[in-house]
Image: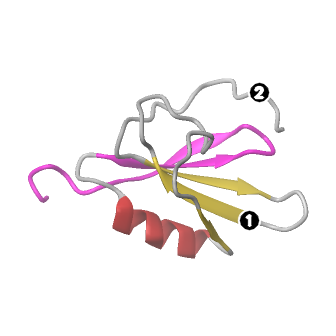
Amino acid sequence: MGPPVLQRMPTHCGDVIILITTESFPTYAMATVSCDGQQDFGRGVNVMHLAGFTEAAKLAQSFVLPGSQIYLMNIDTGEWALVSRGPSHTGE
């Protein structure tokens, strides 16, 4: 288990989380957030494992709902970042 997260990701249902670990080699896991405040994939969500960030980000874009966001969290360090915002509700 990684270090504690100092600030939680402000996730909401419909957002997408990409988790990365570099313990042995870089591995990315991506899934859609199923409940507000979700920080990991321990809720029985359908997780996809990917080899690289570009592949994970592209796939995440296809899953993110309008008005939702994509977050990246390094589970080794506990650091996270907002990767991108999904399309707006108005299609802009």
Q: Is residue 18 left or right of residue 82?
A: right
Query: Which one is nearer the viewer's eye here, 6 or 1?
Result: 1
The segment highlighted magenta reads 68-92
- Whether residue 14 is situated above or below residue 53 in the rendered picture: above
Disc 2: which residue = 4
Which residue matches tag 1?
Answer: 27
- Separation of marks 1 and 2 at Cα, in angstroms: 20 Å
Assign a secondary structure to mark 1: strand
Q: Is residue 78 above or below residue 52?
A: above
Residue at coordinates 44% horizontally, 63% vertically from top-left?
60
Circle 2: residue type: Pro
Task: Please name the residue shown 13% across and 58% down the image.
Answer: 92
Which structural element holds mark 2? loop
Task: Rate crowding at label 1 as few (under 14), some (14 to 19) or many (20 or more) other CA atoms within 10 Å.
Answer: some
Q: Which image quarter: residue 80?
A: top right
Q: Position of residue 49 (x, y in %)?
A: 64, 67
Q: Which amino acid type is marked by label 1?
A: Thr
**In the image, is residue 33 part of the stretch drawn in magenta?**
no
Q: Nearer the viewer, residue 72 or 14?
A: 14
